[in-house]
Image (cartoon, helix red, strand yellow):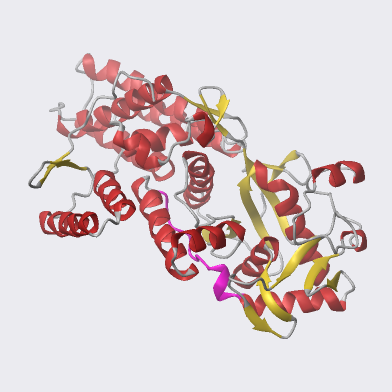
Amino acid sequence: MLYLFNTLTRQKEKFVPLSEGEVKIYTCGPTVYDRVHIGNLRTFMFEDILRRYLQYKGFKVIQTMNITDIDDKTIKGALASGKSLKEYTQHYTQLFFIDIDTLHIEHAEFYPHATDHIDEMIVLIKKLLDHNLAYESKGSIYYRISAFPDYGKLSHLESKELIDGFRIDSDEYEKESMKDFALWKISKEGEPSWETEIGKGRPGWHIECSVMAMKYLGETFDIHAGGVDLIFPHHENEIAQSEGATGKQFVRYWLHSEHLIVDSEKMSKSKGNFYTATDIIEKGTDPLTLRFLLMSVHYRKQLNFTSSSLVQAREAVERLKNFALRLTTEHFREGHSAEKIISLCQNAKLHFEEAMDDDLNISLALASVFELVRHCNIIADANELTKGDATLILNYLAQFDKVFGIIFIEKQEIPEQEILALIEERIQARKDKQYKKADELRDYLLMKGIILEDTKTSTRWKRKLNAELPKEEL
């Protein structure tokens, strides 16, 4: 039986979905104003493991992940780039999918964009106005937190802590209370806006997720996941909006992953320790190594990202892949599976499932598989492994890898014709002085295992071999 730590109750609870055999999950997706960083990817990886393990247990998973393509950051970025909001956000949305595909993160069933759901947001805001949970002020509309008694139940903050945790935006001086938050922001010159029956403006960030979650998953659904930084105020505000409008419980299980830190410090551009997946792969790290590292620490523990942890992750991936390769290529003697091997495999599965059922304890789950690998290698070294044994072990590894997504993942080589076309596109971008586009095309090719070398007269390319991790620090 699966137990998950519910942020709402601060305890592990037996997971029982609303509908037998089906799990509905909402995961907060990217705000597409820039490339996602490895901290974002750590959260997406935790959600991938959650999804994969639920599927492993036989559940049908219906996952929705939003794409935030309208907020202060996307507007600022679009204005600075001279592009329309749609063109600007589409570009970073494409890069997001490249990143998750590179790390073999399974796709959600739905990826709704905020800008495609303005009408539904208006409906929800009007309902909150009708319930006296919202009010209009100077053309903007705010949520009246004092009218929702349960506010703070997710973050477990007292009234004073709530006040201390709020930031007053420059466009929010007309609120009844500093704790109230914007549902709809009045139109500003130069910003995207929509003409609606509640006025000309744009949505606040929090209303977007309430609307998209309930549209695709219903007024009450099973799991809402995200990073710990979203507990307050974002997820707290989602609850206030959704439950205030429907009178029903919004989400039954809230799951939150801890931060990723770099060399024991918070990741930030100012410290020079801010990395995207491309940054790491460009230094010689295989995407599966990065995947392993991001998933290998329990989601409720901080993940300390270091050069040495990358080395350890690479060695772990090699150990798993080399073992699987040995089982498929080595000539073992004829024979059926021995009782000893059957017992080892069954014990590994038992411990794997016990670990994963305990709030997705991936570290212990991995340990159980590595223990199986160790024992079986010893038996194989003694020439005591049969073909039947090898087949049985491979079948068990395949089951585990439905969750890990590491062992039997093969690199998909990009065709030469596509490589040459992208190189030509990059050359043209450089001629047009579109250097950012040129860099992104180079990064995309690198993600696909293609290394470019620019000379004075041309651009050479080669396929990347399994590179050793460079000795220098990240």
Report the front residue among 329 and 229: 229
Left or right of 362? Residue 341 is left
Q: Position of residue 341 (x, y in %)?
A: 34, 26
Instruction: Write the start and end of the magenta stretch as one range.
Output: 105-117
Q: Is residue 261 magenta?
A: no
Asked if the stretch drawn in magenta spans residue 110, the answer is yes
Give the side of residue 180 with respect to residue 316, left or right. Answer: right
Left/right placement of residue 422 relative to residue 53 reads left
Query: Outermost residue, bottom direction?
Result: 197
Q: Is residue 284 above or below residue 307?
A: below
Q: Is residue 65 visible?
A: no
Q: Residue at x 29, y 48 (%)?
A: 439
In the image, 162: left or right of 422?
A: right
User: Can see residue 257?
Assistant: yes
Rendering quarter of residue 201: bottom right
- Counting from the top left corner in percent of width and height, residue 69 is at 53, 64
**In the rendered image of this protein, does residue 337 appear above or below residue 193?**
above
| Quadrant in which the C terminus appears | top left
**Residue visible at 26% across and 32% down?**
324
Image quadrant occupied by the N terminus: top right
Which of the two residues, 17 or 235, is positioned nearer the viewer here? 235
Residue 107 position in % (x across, y down)? 43, 57
Magenta region, main secondary structure: loop
Number of numbered discs visible in the structure rendering: 0
Locate residue 400, reporting x and y percent: 41, 39
